[in-house]
Amino acid sequence: MPKIKNSILFFLLSLLTNISQVNSQEVFISNTQNRTFTSLNGKWKYVMDPYETGQIGFMPLYKNIKQKDKTDRVEYSFDSAQTLWVPGGWNVQKPELLYYEGSIWYRKTFDKENIAKDKRYYIYLGAANYNSTITFNGEILGEHEGGFTPFCYEVTHLIKKRDNYLIVGVNNTRSKDQIPAKVTDWFNHGGITRDVKLLEVPTAFVSNYFLSLNKSTLNLKTKQIDGSLTLTGGTFSQKVKVIIPELKVNKEIIVDSTGTCNFTISVKNLDLWSPKTPKLYKVSIETETEKINDRIGFRTIDTKGKQILLNGNPVFLKGISLHDENPLRRDRANSIDDAKLVLGWAKQLGCNFIRLAHYPHQENIVRLADEMGIMLWEELPLYWGIEWDNPKVLLKAKKQYTELINRDYNRASSIIWSIANETTPTKARNEFLKAIAEHVKSLDNTRLLSAACKKDQAGDGNPENHYTVSDPIMKYLDIVSFNEYLGWYGGLPEECRKKTITSSANKPIIVSEFGGGALQGFYADKLTRWSEEYQENLYIENLAMFNKIDGLAGMTPWILVDFMSPLRQLPDIQDGWNRKGLISEKGVKKKAFYILQDYYKTK
Ligand code: GCB
């Protein structure tokens, strides 16, 4: 008898494990804005958990425990708790949370009157920084690591007509085995920073699809679009249609029960996407039970020797770097209006390119860049201090990259994946980044690879006044990029006149950062630190130096707008802001803005 009991227990346990596997984030659902969903944005109740135990008074927070009668001991209460706005970092919402690093548990309650039998329901989070525990109606759905990429969990088996409660614990404690690691030069906005949605999809649904222009057909009259898609939940073969009305495409695809399928589509008279003509086509993906609309542009991006080729033509990337922050609201960006603000400034500067530093930005900005014709560099926070020799960190990086590529593959604006920023070459780091380069290429060979490298140190065999870039990871990259702060972190701007820069690779070069700080409205002579004149002169000298580089294919100066950083505490100058912006945190342009604007007019 006990034996039977044990086996029943084992069976039940294995069922449970299976359920938790099913619930764990194994499906990636893209293009959520064009699917059926209920927004769960708005005010959420919250309970702080500074000791990060997940419980208060020995009672788990995700159980949403309430006092039953006057004898009952319960030491927390979501019902009478204060609220935080979602999406949004918690730091700027309450003065006592400004520098808070720890856990906060959020709760959202909602009713769902029309629960359809032939539908499935998923909780989708655009991003939560950094570790999240997702629970629904008292069940743990899973945990997600990474502060900038989207994820979802199925709740079909748990959703009710009334009184659903979604409780999410978010922890933004920094740690050396995370990505990013302990120290960054940006603000650690904690919490649910992007949209939360309850998605409603058919039982079998197209969770993701990937469309891109086949490079080898670029110069042909009839071009080819390469495609693949994933049907989730289908138990038998099913028809899926890809429809592009303007191109008279109505392609029928049979997806078998494996759920994935590759296909090609021939197209005539295709207008290519470019910054000058950011043509997007209406694309619909249809099954018998759903229709997903999208707007997709088709282009190729390639290199030839030291040139970057967009649709086969050389292009100079007139760029600027950017953090995903709205300086006016002092918060992580999370809306189309936030995206319009910064892309509007970049357009005024004359940019056709933006480096989305140093982590995946909100999806709205990538979609708006598609519409506005701005090319993008996207990256993960493989930044200072990463534990290169920790295999778990490598797995995390691969997972974050997979999530980002799943989200943005169909965006024509996104042309470069950058795999690291300012990391010192060591054996462990080189192997790690080689593995990441291979991973990214295996998921997406329609974009270029780069990394913001360091140039070689002085005294490493180069003649005086001559810099080279010879980072060993360059061989895995399509573009050589480097950050260079001459005139700010070493020497005065005038020294730029003496320096020359080369790279040993026959590849295009992007200057991925340069710049210096200025307090907007502080005017002095060009040798006075923090003055607008100092920054202005630094731009003049640096631009002249970079202009001499053989193979210069673009640049992304540091940075469009001042951004929050706890590393920057000089009173009355920085006050918690990195001042290298060409625009102040109040939206006022500094003198150097116009220097770069004039330079871009010549390009
Ligand atoms: C860098 C980093 C960037 C910093 C910048 C600075 O090289 O890549 O994250 O914010 O320098 O301002 O020092």
Image (cartoon, rainbow, N blue to C red):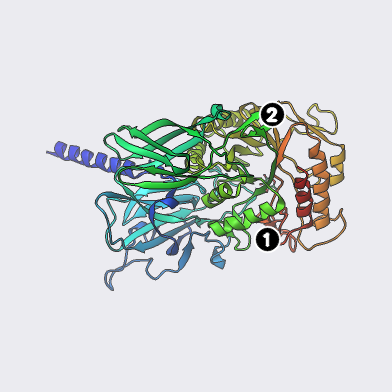
Q: Ligand 1: does it lie within 8 Å of the C-beta at label 2?
A: no
> Residue 426's quadrant in the figure?
top right
For this rendering, which residue is in front, 369 or 555? Answer: 369
Instruction: Give how far across and how far down residue 58 sits, in percent.
Output: 36, 59
Q: Name the residue type under label 2.
A: Lys
Q: Which residue lies furthest to the left in this view?
A: 1
Q: Can residue 440 be seen in this view?
A: yes
Q: Is 439 rendered above or below residue 385? A: above
**Disc 2/disc 1 C-alpha distance (Å):** 36 Å
CB-based contact (under 8 Å), mark 2 and mark 1: no
The structure residue drawn at horizontal position 21% and vertical position 39%, both measured from the top left corner, is 11
Instruction: Give how far across and how far down residue 536 sits, in percent.
Output: 81, 52
Task: List the residue tagged with mark 2.
Answer: 507
Q: Is residue 505 left or right of residue 428?
A: right
The structure residue drawn at horizontal position 31% and vertical position 63%, both measured from the top left corner, is 111
Task: List the residue tagged with mark 1.
Answer: 585
For this rendering, which residue is in front, 98 or 468? Answer: 468
